[in-house]
Amino acid sequence: MIEAIAKTLEQTFSFVTNGGVRVRFAPSPTGFFHIGSARTALFNYLFAQKNKGAFILRIEDTDTERSKPEFEEDIIESLKWLGIKYDEGPHRQSERKNVYRKYIEKLLKEGRAYYCFCTEEDLEAKKQEQMSRGEAPMYDGKCSKLSEKEVESIVEKGERSIIRFKISNKKVSFNDMVRGKIEFDTNLIGDVTIAKNLDTPLYNLAVVVDDYEMKITHVIRGEDLMPNTPKQILIQEALGFSRVEYAHLPLILGSDRSKLSKRHGSTSLREYKELGYLPETLINFLAFLGWNPGTEKEIFSFNALIKEFSMDKVQKSGAVFNIDRLDYINGFYIRHKSLDKLSELCIPYLIQSELITPILKSEKVPATFGGESISFDYIISDTEEKLDRDYLNKVIGAYQERLKKLSEINELVDYFFKEKLEYDGGLLVWKDMTKEEVSLSIDKAIKILSKINDWNKKNIEKALLDEANKIKDRGELLWPLRVALSGKKSSAGPFEIADILGKQKTINRLKQAKIKL
């Protein structure tokens, strides 16, 4: 009890001392956390941080059929992974029914809302009739004309009903922080549904009440929600609430400039996380989806984004989701990771592909992608050798410069974790060489490498290049060598691979290659 009071006082003090800016991020837990929702959360967070305000998390879970605990958990974990910290919450609409009921009853009592008994069939028929005349489909207010006695009589019979809010016929205008002055003609809206019953509020009513009760000052959300704004402003006015400031962010578009959807690729944050995109990458990338600092600078830390962010630099036009740019930023952050940290981040992917296996006695293994690895107890699945930290660092380091996302690591480095490689022996052939010439080339490589006592990349490179430079085409020696060591058409350089594998494994693979010929 004391802790709860202390927290309330702390939040109140925060509101008073932070200049009054309070924003909220209000997702519905009806699916996995969408990349567009992540952008909305980020812009709200940056605005709050820039203005030393408060960022509130509100879970809009009034849709009881579609709202799931696992989706709410995904929202919270995703925000945590991104580093977006909320000052209050999560508040849940499902726990605030008594609050909404009070305001619904107020609107009914004052004649600003009314019970509607029209069936879905009635409404659909009316809609089709209006559309056939070229009119915008909207509710005609039929049930608003019922007397109080008629309403009571129908309610007593237990007939199905909803509660509608009366829309005043006038022009509603507001100043959008992104788009400037916007005006709506409410004659084109019609009376809106605000609740299924006294205990089940719907979006437009609940969001207005929540924003008022939580002292929200600025609503920053996607432009797809803009049609709701005039309805919410009218509900605010009917309840005597002060108006909040609005900012509607541009839509995120696919490469074909249509609204981003599944057909453009992954859309949930967890999918990008599992593909091996880093949180700092997504923060940097999402910030530029609709915002631009006005400089040539492309890479920003979180603190730099907070310092530079302002709503007047948010664009009006749609923001194209450019996967190539996402890969570029991720590659940048991967290259700047320490090898120890990058190796830890790659471990879940190596486990998933069964290249390495956690030692069962250890419980400290990364359970999810993007998790922290505390222990280092793994074996190479194919050979059952204990995985050495230095060995793994060297393997990952060989591809750090070319890695775009962590999920690529399995296919790139699998040959470092296998006893025998599977590949077509014809791949060993360089240009027009015969099999006999390739075999002699491999023998030559074995002879050269066998004589190296101090095994390291520098000595390996010198010994092989001394011989290769005597040949008109160096590929005749180096191509079969690299294929024999990696089993791939494209891989890291042969000197680096040999250094990592060690002398004995390198020579063994060359001998295996002769058999494949």
Image (tube, grey):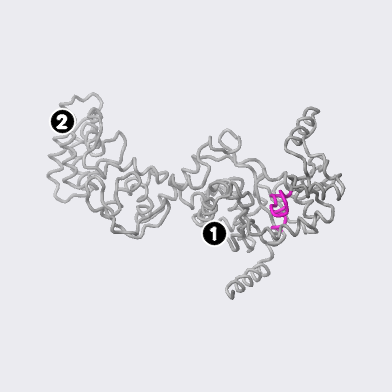
Q: Hey, which residue is sitting farthest front in the picture?
A: 157
Q: Which residue is mark 2?
A: 439
**Quadrant of res 479:** top left
Residue 453 % position (x, y): 14, 49
Question: Which structural element holds mark 1?
Answer: helix
| Residue in the image at 35% along x and 46% along y | 352
Residue type marked 2: Ser
In this view, the residue in front, 237 or 153, is 153
Q: Total marks drawn?
A: 2
Instruction: Please check the rendered image and state whether residue 175 is part of the magenta-colored stretch, yes or no.
Output: no
Q: Which mark is residue 61?
A: none
- Highlighted range, magenta: 194-211
Instruction: Please check the rendered image and state whether residue 207 is part of the magenta-colored stretch, yes or no.
Output: yes
In this view, the residue in front, 197 or 249, is 197
Which quadrant is home to the N terminus? bottom right
- Give the side of residue 216 with respect to residue 469, left or right: right
Residue 7 % position (x, y): 60, 71
| Residue in the image at 24% along x and 45% along y | 382
In this view, the residue in front, 380 or 476, is 380
Q: Which residue is mark 1?
A: 303
Residue 105 % position (x, y): 78, 57
Which quadrant is home to the C terminus? top left
Q: Tell me: residue 306, above or below residue 383.
A: below
Residue type marked 1: Asn
Question: Which structural element holds mark 2?
Answer: helix
Disc 2 residue crowd, few under 14, some 14–19, many 20+, Cα 10 Å: many
Residue 19 % position (x, y): 68, 66
- Of callouts 2 and 1, the N-terminal one: 1
- Give the side of residue 417 with respect to residue 451, left or right: right
| Residue in the image at 13% along x and 43% along y | 450
